[in-house]
Amino acid sequence: PKIDLAWAYVQLGELYLSRGQFDQALEFFEKSLQTLPDYLNGLEHKAEVLALRGDINSAIEIYEKVIQKTADPELKSALAKLCLEVGKKETADSLLNLAKEQFDKYLESDLEAFNRHIAEFYLKWNINLKKALELAQKELDVRQDIHTYDLLAWAYYKNGNSNKAWESISLALKHKAQDSKIFYHAAVIAKAVGKHKESQQYYSQAKAINPLFEKMYPEN
């Protein structure tokens, strides 16, 4: 089925994107859209990579179309970030408020499936940081995996508890996954606890996996 092929192209695109290979990533996102022109997953990833390549206006145009077809608050959040970059603060604030309202509704529903997404949103925008930490801790009760330890570590860091952040990121690193975002977080947290040698090592590992990781994961 076309949907399966379009999905597979997006997965390949994400692989190249995680390595900072934007041109190759875009090629596969385009292939997904050649297969299914209105495939939302392909459109949002195309917008993401266009923004990373500096074509902000084209990315905004795509995101504006996509959010008309889906209620996903993460896409409103992504569009808000781009609007801020081009000086459209009022539009960005409006989008951010809509996204926050939707995430808050998810929070009220008390469905565990949304905990990670809500926490990531709060951490990205530096809002409700204590709640983000609480949600990350709840997520750990359900999933003791590398990404949850990373999420918890970043939540501790954003809440000013670098020592607990170091404990959590150390558990994530034990899984030995080649993930530039996790190595980036480890570098930041190691520096915060005075482990400068380790920080430089993790920074180098992140850069080896994805030379453009700083552009994808700017510290906020």
Image: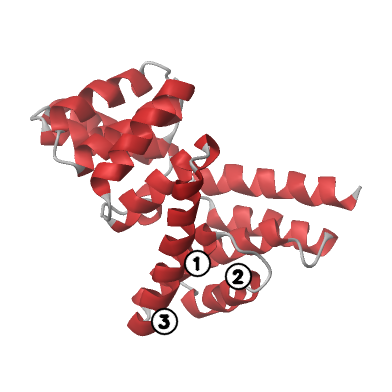
Q: Residues within 10 Å of mark 2 (few under 14, many from 20)?
A: some
Q: Residues within 10 Å of mark 1 (few under 14, many from 20)?
A: many
Tell me which residue sits at (58%, 79%) in the image. Answer: 61
Q: Point out which mark residue 76 bears.
A: 1
In terms of sequence position, does the residue under pointer 2 or pointer 3 come before the other? 2
Q: How many labels does the image show?
A: 3
Badge 1 vs badge 2, beta-carbon distance below 8 Å: yes
In terms of sequence position, does the residue under pointer 1 or pointer 3 come before the other? 1
Q: Where is residue 148 in the image (x, y as percent from the top left)?
A: 42, 29
Q: Which amino acid does label 3 sit on?
A: Thr
**Nearer the observer, 49 or 102:** 102
Q: Where is residue 30 in the image (x, y as percent from the top left)?
A: 72, 62
Q: How is the image coloured?
A: secondary structure
**Nearer the observer, 196 or 153:** 153
Identify the residue under disc 2: 67
In terms of sequence position, does the residue under pointer 1 or pointer 2 come before the other? 2
Identify the residue under disc 3: 91
Q: Which amino acid does label 1 sit on?
A: Lys
**What kind of element bears circle 2?**
loop
**What kind of element bears circle 3?**
helix
Q: Which residue lies furthest to the right in this view?
A: 1
Badge 2 vs badge 3, beta-carbon distance below 8 Å: no
Q: Is residue 203 visible?
A: no
Q: Could you tell me how far apart the alpha carbons at marks 1 and 2 are, in whole angstroms? A: 7 Å
Q: Which amino acid does label 2 sit on?
A: Ile
Vertically, is 208 above or below 174? below
Q: Could you tell me how far apart the alpha carbons at marks 2 and 3 are, in whole angstroms? A: 14 Å
Q: Can residue 181 be seen in this view?
A: yes
